[in-house]
Image (tube, helix red, strand yellow):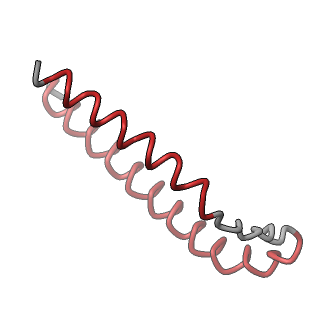
Amino acid sequence: MGLFAQGLILMSVGMVVVFFFLLFLYKVMEVASKIIPNFSYLLPDPEIAAAKPSGTAGTSSDVEIAIAIAVAAKKANR
């Protein structure tokens, strides 16, 4: 048997092995997606507390940004 034929056989066997591995992985994920939600009560999602917006905190940072932009523009025009 020639070297080329051995290469083709090896490539074919490798492709078949990878195909069946991916098929197996797909089936495992499909089964897991049906089983795992049944146990979601064991690890509930944490409650996220809503942050209260403060009117002045956002304004001061906006003013600082505007000042920085104005200073940069002034330096660029020199």
Side of 32 where 3 appears, left or right: left
In the depicted structure, whether residue 22 falls above or below residue 37? above
35 or 63, nearer to the observer: 63
Is the C terminus in the top left, top right, bottom left or bottom right quadrant? Answer: top left
Residue at 53 percent across and 60 percent down: it is: 25
Q: How many marks?
A: 0
Residue at 80 percent across and 67 percent down: it is: 46
Residue 15, percent from left and from top = 31, 48
In the depicted structure, whether residue 33 falls above or below residue 74? below
In the depicted structure, whether residue 75 falls above or below residue 58? above
Side of 44 where 10 appears, left or right: left
Residue at 60 percent across and 66 percent down: it is: 28
19 or 63, nearer to the observer: 63
Residue at 66 percent across and 80 percent down: it is: 34
46 or 16, nearer to the observer: 46
- What residue occupies the far right of the structure in this picture? 42
Side of 32 where 75 appears, left or right: left
Residue 11, percent from left and from top = 26, 39
Q: Splitting the image into 4 quarters, where does residue 52 fall?
A: bottom right
Residue 77, percent from left and from top = 10, 24
In the depicted structure, whether residue 17 falls above or below residue 11? below
Residue 51, percent from left and from top = 70, 65
Is the N terminus in the top left, top right, bottom left or bottom right quadrant? Answer: top left
40 or 68, nearer to the observer: 68
